[in-house]
Amino acid sequence: PRSAAACRVGEASWVCDPGGSLQRAARDELQGALDRIYTRTGAECAVVVLEDLQGGGDDIIRFRQFGTRLFNIWGIGSATHNNGVLLLLFRDARRLEIVTGLGMSKVLPDQWLLDMQLRHMVPHFKVGDYLTGLRSGVLEIEQKLRDCSNRGWRDGSVDGNPSSHALLPAATSFGGGSGRSTQA
């Protein structure tokens, strides 16, 4: 597992917050939760907090495409099991994207992710409490993965059904935005 200290010096980490939206203790707390997910389930989860994407506008496709590209470039999740999760918060744009590897489709289905975001994350984001929203979402994902993840993810075995590299995005807007996303 990666460390919060490694992130601060530009090395690999599960948490990336280049704009400093989260205080060091908050990043460390999220880092610990993401390390637990990896250690206990074998799934790789990353959290990225950005202010916005350059260019502005409400085009939700550009947020999804950015999330998918970032997921693929960083290689989140095992190549064998495709069991990665990326939580991507665009703070000023008031957008949340969660991108999952295809291997997560049964464990974290789109409807569960949407419901979880609306119940546990968006209410905190609406009042500017990004840490509590992210913490709540990460803890819900951690619990779901502990209950439902494939045991082969932890021991490295292949269950005979390796997944493709397709991604499943789930998105929520918590003020503004349009299209398929749910507005809260």
Image (cartoon, rainbow, N blue to C red):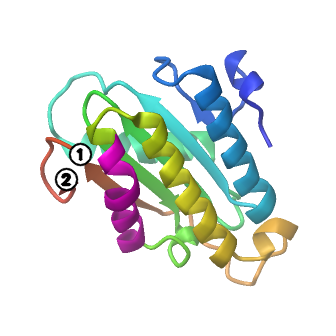
Label 2: which residue? 184
Judge from the rendering whether residue 21 lies leftward or rightward of residue 146; answer left or right.
Answer: left
Is tag 2's residue or tag 1's residue first in the polypeptide sequence?
A: 1
Q: Position of residue 84 (x, y in %)?
A: 60, 56
Q: Residue at x 58, y 70 (%)?
A: 144
Q: Position of residue 14 (x, y in %)?
A: 65, 39
Judge from the rendering whether residue 141 lies leftward or rightward of residue 81; answer left or right.
Answer: left
Magenta-drawn stretch, dominant element (helix, strand or loop): helix
Please rate how many residues cluster around mark 1, counting C-alpha atoms within 10 Å: few if below 14, some from 14 to 19, many from 20. many
**Mark 2 near mark 1, Cβ–Cβ under 8 Å?**
yes
Would you say residue 122 sits in the magenta stretch? yes
Judge from the rendering whether residue 33 lies leftward or rightward of residue 50; answer left or right.
Answer: right
Q: Position of residue 170 (x, y in %)?
A: 36, 59
Q: Secondary structure at mark 1?
A: loop
- C-alpha distance separating marks 2 and 1: 5 Å
Q: Residue at x 55, y 21 (%)?
A: 23
**Disc count in the image?**
2
**Residue numbers of the magenta segment:** 110-124
Q: Position of residue 154 (x, y in %)?
A: 82, 66
Label 1: which residue? 174
On screen, residue 130 above or below 161: above
Q: Mark 2 belongs to which amino acid?
A: Ala
Q: Nearer the viewer, residue 129 or 33?
A: 129
Residue 14 is at least partly visible in this image:
no
Q: Mark 1 belongs to which amino acid?
A: Phe
Q: Nearer the viewer, residue 72 or 19?
A: 19
Q: Residue at x 63, y 68 (%)?
A: 145
